[in-house]
Amino acid sequence: FPSHDRALLKNIFEDDTLFLTADTLVSLDNKQTKTKKLYAYKKVLVYKSDLSAKCDSLSYNVSDSTIYFYQKPILWNSKNQSEADSIHILLHHNKIHQMNMKGKSFIVSIDTLTNFNQVKGRKIVANFKLGKIERVSVDGNGESIYFAVDEKNNLTGMNRVQCSKMTMQFAKGKINRIAFLAKPDGKFVPPKEIQSDDKELDG
């Protein structure tokens, strides 16, 4: 059924609700193939307790719990902001399980000192556990800025690295380990030498 004029969808889970609004919503339910899909067009907004998003259009495959976001979407999850030319996320037990980002992919997360850790690349895959980011893999044109903080929550410096392939492991919402897999080029900047222009990646 098509619906117009800022249509609203509420998809109720056991302990959560997904709200989706757009200029146009179209729902397709094929009982023969047991597939159910939803399409949203223009000025799409999404809200769930662990996810907010905005994009031009999306498709939601209800059957396999996959949401495809198109036309430069922006997603917010916990303290992370993610954007790319296109993104699709896989839900598992109604929580984000995996996020696949393609084309000008960029993730920004705020740390306990309100610094912005950043990673960008051509393709990024982020894996989540219980709705929290656990691992990020970057493939192609990788760049990162992350701020090193000691056990007393003091800033010890800023790492800025370029590397076509990298992986980041997170623990309790913080970067725990980074592996640079292809000829990294980087520098560590002590706190007193950090300039404001150095704290942001292009884009």
Image (tube, helix red, strand yellow):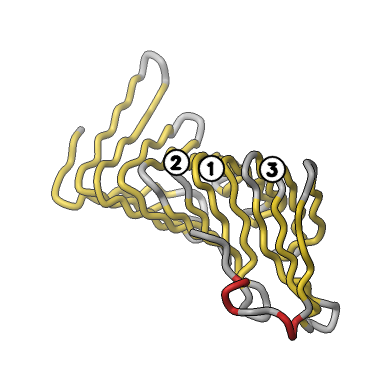
Q: Secondary structure at mark 3?
A: loop
Q: Which residue is mark 1?
A: 101
Residue at 57% over, 62% down: 201
* Mark in front: 2 vs 3: 3
Q: Position of residue 42 (x, y in %)?
A: 24, 46
Q: Which residue is mark 2?
A: 86
Amino acid under label 2? Ser
Q: Residue furthest left?
A: 5
- For marks 1 and 2 on the same chain, the one whose residue lies earlier in the sequence: 2
Gap in angstroms between the C-alphas marked 2 and 3: 20 Å
Q: Residue furthest top?
A: 32
Residue at 34% over, 20% down: 30
Q: Quadrant of residue 198?
A: bottom right
In the drawing, does residue 79 fall left or right of residue 166?
left
Amino acid under label 1? Met
In the drawing, does residue 41 fall left or right of residue 159?
left
Amino acid under label 3? Ser
* Mark in front: 1 vs 3: 3
